[in-house]
Amino acid sequence: MATAKARSQLCRLSDLSLIRSELAKMPDRRANQNARLIDIATLCIPRVRARLGSDCHAVRAEILTIAAEWDLRRDQLEDQSDECIAAIAAMLRR
């Protein structure tokens, strides 16, 4: 039996799907490997470099938001808050 998902759950699943698809493109990455903060940082580096002409304060704010929201005690992507997942996905979409 299918269950209805709340909008927030659907947004989270969509964001996680985007992040996982981008992580899958990374070299030297196993398919079922859990993503940690270092993996997310590695994923964001090329995007930061590609946006050198944009507002450096906005880019810095995005990076700081991800770092501030990330829970190091539970250093797995799936264990992070909805806000953290949304911040990562927003950076990847830009």
Image: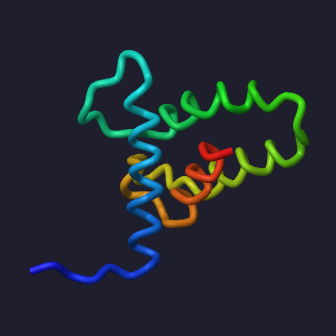
Position of residue 24 relative to residue 57, above or below, is above
Color theme of the render: rainbow
Quadrant containing the N terminus is: bottom left
Which image quarter is the C terminus in? top right
Q: Which residue lies at the image location 60% right of the left edge and 43% below the top edge?
A: 92
Q: Residue placed at 51% from the left, 57% from the top?
A: 85
In the foreground, 74 or 26? 26
Q: Is residue 55 above or below residue 15?
A: above
Point out the residue furthest to the left here: 1
Is 42 displayed left or right of 22 in the figure? Answer: right
Q: Position of residue 20 (x, y in %)?
A: 39, 42
* Rendered image quadrant of residue 28: top left
Q: Is residue 69 left or right of residue 64?
A: left
Q: Position of residue 79 (x, y in %)?
A: 38, 57
User: Residue 84: image x %, image y %?
Assistant: 56, 58
- Give the side of residue 35 with respect to residue 57, left or right: left
Up-down relation of residue 5 to residue 79 (above or below):
below
Q: Residue at x 38, y 82 (%)?
A: 6
Residue found 69% across the figure and 54% down from its top: 65
* Residue ranking furthest to the top: 28
Which of the 4 image quadrants contains residue 44?
A: top right
Q: Count of labels shown?
A: 0
Q: Quadrant of residue 45?
A: top right
